Image: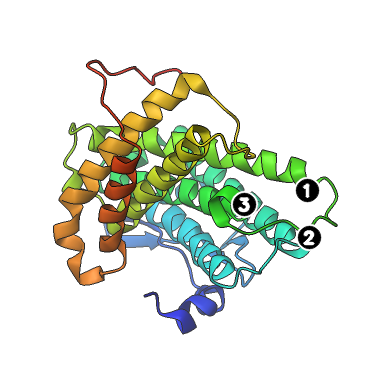
């Protein structure tokens, strides 16, 4: 279980502390250059906005990662305190954190595109993978709260256009689930060592599997849901479920001490077997879909 008192005050504890900066060597030794810090609302503040060294004060991979983890901490609290029904207040929170995560993600990817030389190490690339996976997890979990199929929470019918809100949220969940599955594809297909994935990313894979299973079960049982029907992707998503089950089985050995995440793989395996998923002889490519 997460240390709840720390998560509750995570932004307060981290506020005004400099994010990890860049380290460079010079004639007088090593120099640590800080770029940004976060305020108590998790908004970035430049250390020296008009600095002549602005080119050396760009955001680092560890700095971007800490930013998105801060959003994930708040997402956990939002889920922990979820209400009996989704009201306009909960909708506001979902949209607020979703927007914040999107801004941080766009800032991080823009920095990578502008300064690719800063991200050519294995450590930086692994942090980028971790960062992007957590971003997609934030969006999946946040918008799942609005969709009864995923959360079990009905919407307050006094909310304007509540049905449209649910449909948009379902589309967002499926989109980010597909993106996260694509991001993890090299690990799920055996091209990369799956045992090197951090437990939190493995948990994200489990969430993707449950999203796909829920939609497939609803489709087979002819249950009307908010989730858009995309028959072209159904087969690919079923293959992803099987790949996720295998990956989680490999990861279970190193997760035993964590207990809670380790329980996910058997549950997902049983659910997959109940759907009697049969692997086709050839894999349908997901590239470009």
Residue pictured at 34% horizontal, 17% vertical:
285
Indicate the position of residue 113 as horizontal and vertical percent values: 46, 33
Disc 2 element: helix
Report the number of discs. Answer: 3
Q: From mark 2 to mark 1, how far is it between C-alphas?
A: 9 Å
Residue at the far front in the pictured view: 221
Mark 1 or mark 3, whichever is nearer to me? 3
Q: Mark 1 points at which residue?
A: 162
Between 237 and 199, the residue placed more toward the observer is: 237
| Residue 278 x %, y % | 27, 27
Q: In which quarter of the image is the N terminus?
A: bottom left
**Residue wearing tag 3:** 148
Whichever of labels 1 and 3 marks the residue nearer the N terminus, that label is 3
Q: Quarter of the image holding residue 182?
A: top left
| Residue 229 occupies quadrant | top right
Point out residue 231 in the picture as x, y percentages from the top left corner.
50, 21
Q: Which of marks 3 and 2 is nearer the N terminus?
A: 2
Q: Nearer the viewer, residue 41 or 16?
A: 41
* In this picture, residue 27 sits left or right of residue 105: left
Determine which residue is flagged by label 2: 88
Q: Is residue 203 left or right of residue 146?
A: left
């Amino acid at each position: 279980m997460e240390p709840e008192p720390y998560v509750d005050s995570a932004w307060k504890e981290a506020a005004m502390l400099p994010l990890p900066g860049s380290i460079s060597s010079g004639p007088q030794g090593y120099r640590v250059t800080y770029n940004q810090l976060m305020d108590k609302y998790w908004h970035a503040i430049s250390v020296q906005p008009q600095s002549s060294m602005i080119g050396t004060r760009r955001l680092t991979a560890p700095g971007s990662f800490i930013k998105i983890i801060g959003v994930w901490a708040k997402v956990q609290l939002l889920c922990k305190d979820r209400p009996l029904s989704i009201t306009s207040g909960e909708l506001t929170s979902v949209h607020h954190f979703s927007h914040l995560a999107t801004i941080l993600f766009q800032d991080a990817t823009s920095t990578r595109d502008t300064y690719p030389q800063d991200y050519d190490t294995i450590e930086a690339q692994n942090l980028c993978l971790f960062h992007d996976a957590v971003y997609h997890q934030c969006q999946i979990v946040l918008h799942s709260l609005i969709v009864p199929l995923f959360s079990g929470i009905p919407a307050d019918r006094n909310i304007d256009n509540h049905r449209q809100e649910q449909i948009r949220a379902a589309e967002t969940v499926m989109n980010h689930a597909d993106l996260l599955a694509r991001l993890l594809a090299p690990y799920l297909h055996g091209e990369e060592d799956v045992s090197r994935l951090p437990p939190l990313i493995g948990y994200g894979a489990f969430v993707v599997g449950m999203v796909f299973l829920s939609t497939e079960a609803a489709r087979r049982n002819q249950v009307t849901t908010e989730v858009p029907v995309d028959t072209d992707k159904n087969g690919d998503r079923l293959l992803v479920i099987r790949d996720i089950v295998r990956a989680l089985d490999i990861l279970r050995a190193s997760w035993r001490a964590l207990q809670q995440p380790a329980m996910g793989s058997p549950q997902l395996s049983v659910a997959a077997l109940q759907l009697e998923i049969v692997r086709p002889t050839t894999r349908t490519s997901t590239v470009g879909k």
